[in-house]
């Protein structure tokens, strides 16, 4: 995790989106069994309220799949995600319509950077180091996915505002 964010409170689950994605659960790095489970975790953690509609999340994960293929894939992915979270599986909640992650127990480096940027913008201050960090690639292995590109665009807009 980025040491410059050490003043941010850390959750039980820590996600590094800047550069290569990393997941740390109670101080221990973990690797989820599939890319889809890992991406779902990041998608939920980056969602404004920590939740996404089941069809929306399914479309992000399997954009080319037939609608009939998504429910069984989705069920498997949720099982993999909960298994990976082990005794902290309660961080994830799913009902028929929505999947939600408990954002109070999850810290995400890029969310902390964005909060710092918004604070600087509100105070009309400049921060070249923060601008440079915001412009670094996020979730690098997945940068061709539209949802990652959207997240990168959020960072770029903040960086541009901060740079003045």
Image: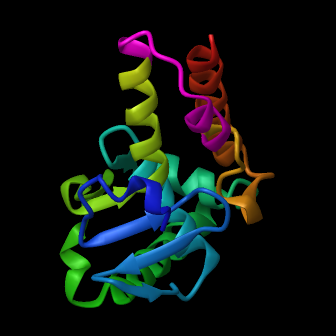
Q: Is residue 106 above or below residue 148?
A: below
Residue 116, image x and y in percent? Answer: 40, 34
Instruction: Examine the image and state in which quarter residue 112 appears.
Output: top left
Magenta portion: prevailing SS class: helix
Residue located 42% across and 22% down the image: 120
Is residue 36 inside the magenta stretch?
no
**Front in this rendered view, residue 102 or 115:** 115
Residue furthest out toward the right: 144
Instruction: Examine the image and state in which quarter residue 10 appears.
Output: bottom left
Whether residue 63 appears in this view of the structure is: yes
Left or right placement of residue 136 versus residue 99 in this view: right
Left or right placement of residue 133 versus residue 76 in this view: right
Residue 137, image x and y in percent? Answer: 72, 50
Residue located 33% across and 48% down the image: 51
Is residue 129 inside the magenta stretch?
yes
Instruction: Examine the image and state in which quarter residue 151 appears.
Output: top right
Residue 18, image x and y in percent? Answer: 60, 56
Residue 129, image x and y in percent? Answer: 60, 37
What segment is highlighted magenta in the picture? 121-133
């Amino acid at each position: 995790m980025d040491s410059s964010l050490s003043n941010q409170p850390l959750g039980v689950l820590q996600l590094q989106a800047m550069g290569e994605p990393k997941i740390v659960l109670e101080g221990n790095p973990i690797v989820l069994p599939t890319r889809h489970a890992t991406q779902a975790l990041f998608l939920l953690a980056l969602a404004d309220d920590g939740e996404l509609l089941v069809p929306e999340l399914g479309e992000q994960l399997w954009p080319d799949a037939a609608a009939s293929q998504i429910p069984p894939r989705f069920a498997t992915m949720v099982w993999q995600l909960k298994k990976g979270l082990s005794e902290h599986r309660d961080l994830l909640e799913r009902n028929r319509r929505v999947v939600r992650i408990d954002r109070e127990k999850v810290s995400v480096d890029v969310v902390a950077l964005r909060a710092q940027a918004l604070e600087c913008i509100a105070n009309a201050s400049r921060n070249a180091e923060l601008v440079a960090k915001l412009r670094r690639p996020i979730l690098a292995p997945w940068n061709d996915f539209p949802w990652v590109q959207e997240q990168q665009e959020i960072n770029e807009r903040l960086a541009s505002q901060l740079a003045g």
